[in-house]
Each structure stands twice: as C-alpha cells, then as structure tokens.
Amino acid sequence: MVTFDARDAGTSQAVWRSDPRLDSLGDLHLDRFDRVVVVSAHPDDETLGAGGLIAECALRSIEVSVIVVTDGCASHPESPTFDRETLARWREAEVREAVAILAPHAPVRTLAFEDGNLDASVPATRDAVALAVGTGSGDAVLLVAPWRGDGHHDHEIVGRIAAEVASSSGCSLAEYPIWMWHWANPNDPTVPWNDLASLHLSPLSLEAKTTAVAAHRSQVEPLSEQPDDEAVLRSDFLEHFTRSAEIFVVSSPVAHREPPLTTLPAAYFEKTYDLHADPWGFTDRWYEERKRALTVASLPRPRYGYGLEIGCSIGVLTQELAARCDRLLAVDISEAAIARARERLVETPNVELQVQDVGKDFPPGSFDLVVLSEVGYYFSPERLDAVLHDIEGSLTPEGTLVACHWRYPVGDYLQSGDGVHGRIAANRSWHRISKHEEKDFVLEVFTLDGRSVAEETGLR
C-alpha cells in the first residue's frame, strides 16, 4: 500500500488541473438512479469525496442516505486537550451537521466503530451496508464508497466491503478518491484514468459542499494552539475539493454515456427557492428593475389581448406585463415560485398562474404576446427548438415574442443566453424588429409579420 504523511505538502490542485484528461472524462449521471447510499470510513470522507453528489441528489429529489463506519477518534492521537471519546462525539455532531447542509432530509447512520481498528468490525460493517442497499436492488441503486486504492487502510477496507455488497446485490458502484489527490500525480500509473467519471456540480451544490466541509471544524481548524492539536487537513489539500466536479472510479459501466438533460428539473428550482425567497434579486436589485423597465418598454403594441409569460418566477415582471394585457397566463416549473407569485398578484385578477413545464406540456391557446425572459438557457438547444416551435404555433399572426437573457456563462445552465437568441434568430419565420444589447444581457423583440411600430401604426 502507498505510504504518505497528511502533514506534508502533496500534489497541488494546479498540477491536477493542468492535465487535460480531467476535462474529457465520461459523465456520471445520477438521474438513472432511484436511490443512492453513500458510505464513508470516517466522519468527513463523505463530504470531501461525495458531498457534491449528496447535494445533487437532494437537488434532484433522489433518495440518499449516509453510513459513517468509524468514529474518527484517531485524528489527533496525541492531543493534549481532547480525549478520544470527546473527539468521537464532536466528530459525530460535525458529520450530522455537514450532511444536513448537503441534503437536509438524508438519514445518517453512524456505526461508531473504533477508528484505526476497523479490521475487527468488517462483518458488522458489511451487514450494515448490505442492509442499506437491500437485496436484488439492481441498477436502480448506486452505492458510493471510498476508493479501494486510496492508500489509506480504512478506505481500502470500506471500499472492499462496498465492492462485495455491490457484486452480491447487483447495484452500481462508484468509488471516490480522497488521498490519491495528495500522494499521486497525473502521470502516476496507479491513477485509474480509464475508470474515472466526472459528476458536474451545480453552483448550489458546490456552495453547499463548501459550507459542509467547513462544518468539520475539528479537521479543518486547530483544536487549540497546543502542539499536536494542529488542523489535520491542510488548506492546500482542501483545494482539491473545491472543483466544480467530483471524480469517481467506476469500474463497471455505471453511467458514462447517459443522454444529457434536456431541461433543468423542477427539483433544481424547488431547491433554489428553498434556499432563497427571491433567488435572483428581482425585488431589490437595480439591475433587475432597470431590465424590467426596458423589457416592458420594448413591447411594440400598447395593449395585448392574451399574453403568455414562460418562467414567471415570483411574479415581479408578471405584475408589469399584466398592466399591458387583458389576460395573462404566467407559468413556471416551480410550485414554490407560483405560490409566491400568487401572494404577490392576489389583487391582479387578469393573471392566471399555473405550474407547468413548457418543455413537456406547452399550454394551449392563441397568444398575442409571449415573453421568454431569463429562461431559455434552462433548455437544451434541441428542447429549446421544440419550445420555439410551440411558441410559433401558438402566436397570432400579429403576435410578439420578447426574449431577454443574461449573457455570462453559468455552469449548470444548458446553454448560453447568446445561444438562445442565436437559435431564435436562426428561424426564418421570426423577424427581429428591435434589439438592445449590453455587456450583461441581450433583449430582442420578434414578430411573424415583421412590421415595425411605425408601420403598424400607419406612420410609414
């Protein structure tokens, strides 16, 4: 087995990032699984190696549970201020706090076997993992555990147990390296490049992981200023776990080439609204207030009979559009967003609010106005094309399409704002009658008949 000292400086994150193979790994797709079981050898392994995965499960409404095998009492064996029992209790509290940050409803089972003496508890550990996975679970369950080749004895034991359970139950297995990033380098022959898969983390999941790592205070901060109470995890080592993707070893075809997402799922937005009442600052940012004013001012007609707003969020723009429409249908994929929009628009009777995923079920009717504001990049290019086709079919001959989108790249969006507008403009049925472009956003107005305001009102 590899030997290393966690107190020494290891291979830097910059060295690993410089290897182009990290950016060309196959994808680990979670959406094929109904249930995920994460096993860690010590309290903090689950957060470092699979914290983003746990958060992604919560975000996507995938059932996830965590098993922590040892009590972690051996992290500071010579500490002059904390005995092993006290440290074990502290670390259990930390792991429960961390998992609650990642996935608030995920159950955590701590087996509390003595850290450093795991060989004596292999049968009991195997039974606990097998019970969590279930018999005959098949491909619907993903078991996640430390990588057997990580160079740490406890990680090897827990990883080997997980592999045995996966083989007997038929579930899928993904193993997370932790110390490999420290003692190995990209050209080390022990790095299993051919078996590595990457899980992209949304900004929300990465933020949750960062907060959860900090919750393991006994490991990332000194216990005291006394000798032998130093932080166990060096700051340069922790940089390996700030990536926007987590890397797993998947020796079987877990999910390298699943079809990509065509629409960000409803759970993504529900999680967003759980964390923030107004996630994008519609009510208090001048940027948003000004953009709304420009959007409403760009409408080429003073009044519309029946309008459709796709992705209405909490109803701030909806309120202003309602003043220009006899009737307005405002839809959003998020139940939480629609609930808040109802509160805002309780005295706006000409607005109908509806929970709807227009990528799967476009609302029926003929609309004089369709507003697609800050939502097009949540669709894949192919799904957006289908939505645009539905918009075209639903618009009256004199109807208006307004599109407005943020122009900067966002990691979890399925395309860019400029890409959205490029696909609209590529459809020869649409005629652009106005365009407002800034560094931050682009706002365009399209019609089917191509008439300008002057032409429509008889000035020209």
Image: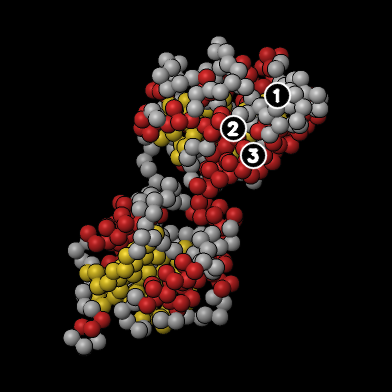
Quarter of the image that includes the N terminus: top right
403 displayed left or right of 281: left
Q: Which mark is residue 235?
A: 2
Q: Which mark is residue 214?
A: 3
Residue 289 appears at what percent x and percent y?
Answer: 47, 71
Identify residue type, mark 2.
Ser
Residue 17 appears at what percent x and percent y?
Answer: 42, 31
Identify residue type, mark 3.
Ala
Q: Regarding mark 2 in the picture, which secondary structure is present there?
A: helix
Give the CA separation, mark 3 to mark 1: 16 Å
Residue at 21 percent across and 75 percent down: it is 449
- How packed mark 1 is, by other alpha carbons closer than 10 Å (few <14, some 14-19, many 20 or more), is many
Q: Regarding mark 3 in the picture, which secondary structure is present there?
A: helix
- How packed mark 2 is, by other alpha carbons closer than 10 Å (few <14, some 14-19, many 20 or more), is few
Residue at 60 percent across and 35 percent down: it is 47
Is residue 117 among the parts visible in the rendering? yes
Q: Regarding mark 1 in the picture, which secondary structure is present there?
A: loop
Q: Nearer the viewer, residue 291 or 458?
A: 291
Q: Please, is residue 381 above or below residue 64 in the view?
A: below
Quarter of the image that includes the C terminus: bottom left
Query: How many numbered marks, from 0 up?
Result: 3
Identify residue type, mark 1.
Ser
Give the CA separation, mark 3 to mark 2: 11 Å
Q: Earlier in the sequence, mark 3 or mark 2?
A: 3
The residue pinned by badge 1 equals 75
Which numbered disc, 3 or 2, marks the residue closer to the eye?
A: 2
Q: Earlier in the sequence, mark 2 or mark 1?
A: 1
Farthest residue to the bottom: give it.
Answer: 458
- How packed mark 3 is, by other alpha carbons closer than 10 Å (few <14, some 14-19, many 20 or more), is some
Q: Are marks 2 and 1 in contact (CB under 8 Å)?
A: no
